[in-house]
Amino acid sequence: MFLFHLAPAERIAFVGLARHLIAADGREGVAEAAALEALEVELGLPATEIAPAAPTPELLSTFASRSSRGAALLELLALAYADGVPHPEEMELLKTIAAGLHISELRLLEMEHWVVQQLPLNAIANAFLSEDE
């Protein structure tokens, strides 16, 4: 939804982080695979060809603007919630990413709250797109 904020290098870094996040709990569920596929379409990148990437300071410094850092974190939060409730390992990883992006823990919680509120609205929107009247 917000990935248009990312420059080409940021898109590649984001996919690496997304793949690392999905692997954080030791399993990739159907919902996570579908969410990654949707991100792949939105980004126009072959996500399966980009290696998972840990949130190193060098990688996180790729995100140059406030909007790209926020967009990346919002999308990663949504990915963590793709299969329902995020695994504790995923949440720890998101805290590490937020800190590396210079986003406070309070802001991370606010962003998480927004993502949780959007989940039922996204389900309704998807129903609009797939159901007959």
Image (cartoon, rainbow, N blue to C red):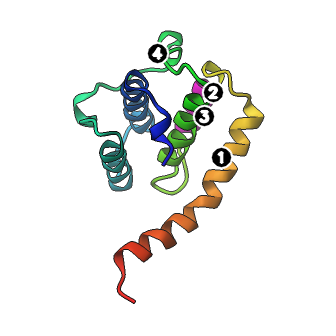
Callout 3 secondary element: helix
Q: CA distance from mark 4 to mark 1?
A: 22 Å
Tag nearer the camera, 1 or 2: 2
Residues at marks 1 and 3, CA–CA distance in whole angstroms: 12 Å
Q: Which residues are magenta?
A: 90-98
Q: Earlier in the sequence, mark 4 or mark 3?
A: 4
Q: Could you tell me how many numbered marks the image carries? A: 4
Q: Are marks 4 and 3 in contact (CB under 8 Å)?
A: no
Q: Which residue is mark 2?
A: 66
- Quarter containing the C terminus: bottom left
Task: Determine whether, in the image, residue 10 is placed left or right of residue 50.
Answer: right
Q: Quadrant of residue 98?
A: top right
Residue 96: say if magenta.
yes
Q: Are marks 4 and 1 in contact (CB under 8 Å)?
A: no
What is the C-alpha distance between the residues marked 3 and 2?
A: 6 Å
Contact flag, marks 1 and 3 (Cβ < 8 Å): no
Q: Spatial distance from mark 4 to mark 3, Cα to Cα? A: 15 Å
Is residue 65 on the magenta stretch? no
Q: Earlier in the sequence, mark 1 or mark 3?
A: 3
Determine the CA span between mark 1 and mark 2.
Answer: 17 Å
Q: Are marks 1 and 2 in contact (CB under 8 Å)?
A: no
Comparing labels 2 and 4, the label whose residue is closer to the camera? 2
Q: Which residue is mark 4?
A: 59
Q: Are marks 2 and 4 in contact (CB under 8 Å)?
A: no
- The single residue placed furthest to the top in the displayed view is 58
Residue 112: mark? 1
Ranked by sequence position, the earlier of labels 4 and 1 is 4
Q: Please tell me whether mark 2 sits on a helix, a strand or a loop.
A: helix
Label 3 sits on residue: 70
Disc 4 residue crowd, few under 14, some 14–19, many 20+, Cα 10 Å: some
Inspect the image, locate mark 1, and give the three-letter code of the amino acid beneath it.
Glu
Chief secondary structure of the magenta span?
helix
